[in-house]
Image: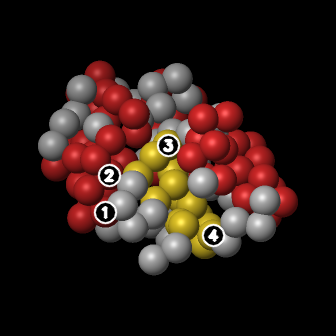
Amino acid sequence: MGLKVYGLQNCDSCRKAKKWLEAEAISFEFHDLRKSPIDAETLRHWLSSIGAGALINRRGTTWRTLSDSQMTAHGEALVSLIMDHPAIMKRPIFVTEHDVSVGFDNNQKQTLAN
């Protein structure tokens, strides 16, 4: 399994990550979360690997449109919420055979380059 990058096609951070990966000649597969939603099992794995705090973007416009009960969801309700609103996830999400990580900064670049 190679590097998979999950995100949204129109996300600035995702575009920057893809451009950087291409410039570094790092092979990856991009998965647009709106065009091809991920399954509940994958979300459960991500949540158990990195936690909701790392995965959920609580500063985005999608988050601000949610109800109070949606904002406090956990467990299967949170999985369903993310599946219904993939834009509440921080992006990009990098998945390898052994790791799940979120965001694109200098630390992430260093990790991906190695």
Secondary structure state at the residue bearing disc 4? strand
Q: Distance between the residues labelled 2 and 4?
A: 18 Å
The residue carrying pointer 2 sits among few (fewer than 14), some (14 to 19) or many (20 or more) residues within 10 Å by Cα, namely many
Q: Earlier in the sequence, mark 3 or mark 2?
A: 2
Residue 61 lies, in percent from the top left, at 57, 29
Any part of residue 11 in sight? no
- Position of the N terminus, as image quadrant, is bottom left
Mark 1–mark 4 Cα distance, whole angstroms, equals 18 Å
In the image, what residue type sits under mark 1?
Thr
Residue beneath label 1, please?
A: 42
From the viewer's perspective, is the residue at label 2 or at label 4 nearer?
4
Q: Kindly identify which numbered label has been placed on residue 102.
A: 3
Amino acid under disc 3: Val
Q: Residue furthest front?
A: 114
Q: Disc 4 marks which residue?
A: 28
Question: Which residue: 55% across, 29% down?
Answer: 60
The residue located at (51%, 35%) in the rendering is 62
Using the image as rendered, state which of residue 35 and residue 57 is in the foreground: 57
Name which residue type carries label 4: Phe
Decide: few, some or many residues near mark 1? Use Cα within 10 Å; few <14, some 14-19, many ≥20. Answer: few
Q: What element carries label 1?
A: helix
Toward which corner of the image does residue 67 lie, by quadrant? Answer: top left
Q: Which amino acid does label 2 sit on?
A: Trp
Q: Quadrant of the C terminus?
A: bottom right
Residue occupied by mark 2: 46
